Image (spheres, rainbow, N blue to C red):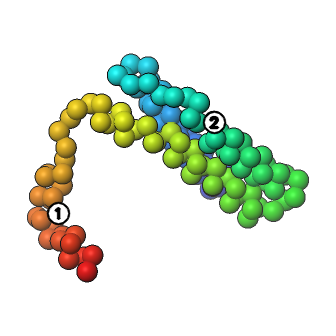
Amino acid sequence: MDQGSSTNRIIWTAIAAVGAIVSVSAIIGPFQIVWTSFLPSIGTFCMLSIGSWFYRTVRSDQRIAVTLNSTSQILAFVAVTVPLSYIAASTSLPLWDEILATWDRHLGLDWLQLRR
């Protein structure tokens, strides 16, 4: 197994794991996911995947195949991670803003100064 296929498998496994977490959270959580909202992403994902397959097997242009596959992975990752913000908000846990700001101060980071 080469580096590319190993990395590819890891990426798709991570996407599947996040998708499973989102699905389980939707089943047991206090909110509902409108599954039809995923249809545009699924359609685009299918077109990118078919294009990747075509350029990997028929036209044998690995650069285009890898680009289309990478784009499909980004799209799939975004599609499954967007609901995570709703899952996090539904837990009603305290925000970490003050803790993170304290850590920044201890590390000497001044984000406002870095913007200038």
How far across and how far down the image is residue 32, in percent? 44, 24
Residue sitting at x 67%, y 52%? 69
* Residue hosting label 1: 104
Whether residue 79 appears in this view of the structure is yes
Query: Relative to the observer, which residue lies in front, 113 or 9?
Result: 113
Residue sitting at x 83%, y 51%? 54
> How busy is the neighbourhood of tag 1: few (under 14 within 10 Å), some, or many (20 plus)?
few
> What amino acid does circle 1 point to?
Asp
- Discs 1, 2 touching: Cβ within 8 Å: no
- In the picture, the quarter occupied by the C terminus is bottom left
Residue sitting at x 14%, y 71%? 108
Q: Secondary structure at mark 1?
A: helix
**Residue 79 relative to residue 55: left or right:** left
Residue 90 picture quarter: top left
**Residue 116 relative to residue 81: left or right:** left
- Residue 59, relative to residue 73: is it above or below? below
Q: How far apart, in angstroms, are the residues tagged by discs 1 and 2?
A: 41 Å
Which residue of the protein is positioned furthest toward the bottom in this rendering?
Answer: 116
> What amino acid does circle 2 point to?
Leu
Residue 76 picture quarter: top right
Residue sitting at x 27%, y 76%? 115
Q: Which mark is residue 39?
A: 2
Q: Which mark is residue 79?
A: none
**Residue 30 relative to residue 15: left or right:** left
Whether residue 2 appears in this view of the structure is no
How far across and how far down the image is residue 75, in percent? 58, 48
How far across and how far down the image is residue 55, in percent? 81, 56
How far across and how far down the image is residue 47, in percent? 74, 46
